[in-house]
Each structure stands twice: as structure tokens, then as C-alpha cells.
Amino acid sequence: AALLSEIKGVDGATVMITQEDGKCVGAVVVFDGEDGILVRLKITQIAAKALSVAENRIYVYPSDKK
């Protein structure tokens, strides 16, 4: 979450990791800040690399905080 918070346009992030047999298999990221396709793409790519999972296993959503 700290790594994702460093992305331009992201004010903070919460990461919930899905595990199977103790191994990370996916994650849900909820972030505060600017919502846009490039921000979501950067979050997806960085989270996937950091967790060693496929990008299609990372789900990214903006928070509903205003």
C-alpha cells in the first residue's frame, strides 16, 4: 500500500490480498485520489509485480471518499 501511495494521483491505498495455500493469488486495491485509466493501470502493474501475480488477478477500485 505504501508503494502504491507514491504513484502520482494516488493519495492512499488499501490492499487486500487473496491467498491460497499461503501463496498470494490475487488482490483488491482501493485507492484515494485521482481516478483515471492511467492511474488504475499503474496501480495494477505495480501491485502485480510486487505480489508476483498476473495483472488480471489485481482488481482496482477508487474509494467513495469525497
Image (cartoon, rainbow, N blue to C red):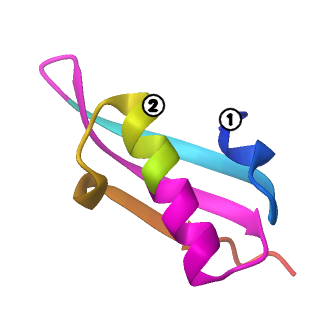
Instruction: Provide the residue designation for mark 1.
Output: 3
The residue that appears at 26% across and 38% down in the rendered structure is: 53
The residue that appears at 21% across and 16% down in the rendered structure is: 22
Q: Is residue 27 shown above or below 19?
A: below
The magenta span reads 20-44
Q: Is residue 17 left or right of residue 21?
A: right
Residue 22 lies in the magenta-colored region: yes
Q: Earlier in the sequence, mark 2 or mark 1?
A: 1
In the rendering, at what x and y percent does residue 23 appear?
A: 21, 21
| Element carrying mark 1 | loop
| Element carrying mark 2 | helix
Amino acid type of the residue that numbered disc 2 sits on in the rendered structure: Ala
In the rendering, at what x and y percent does residue 49 appear?
A: 40, 36
**Do the residues under discs 2 and 1 have CB atoms within 8 angstroms?**
yes
Instruction: Provide the residue designation for mark 2.
Output: 50
Q: Is residue 31 shown above or below 45?
A: below
Quarter placement of the C terminus: bottom right
In the rendering, at what x and y percent does residue 37 appear?
A: 56, 81
In whole angstroms, how far apart are the C-alphas of marks 2 and 1?
A: 9 Å
Number of marks in the rendered image: 2
Amino acid type of the residue that numbered disc 1 sits on in the rendered structure: Leu
Q: Is residue 50 left or right of residue 53?
A: right
Quarter placement of the N terminus: top right
| Residue 35 or residue 46, whichever sits in front | 46
Residue farthest along the left direction in this orientation: 21
Circle 1 packing at 10 Å, graded few (<14), some (14-19), many (20+), is few
The residue that appears at 50% across and 67% down in the rendered structure is: 41
Q: Is residue 29 left or right of residue 62?
A: left
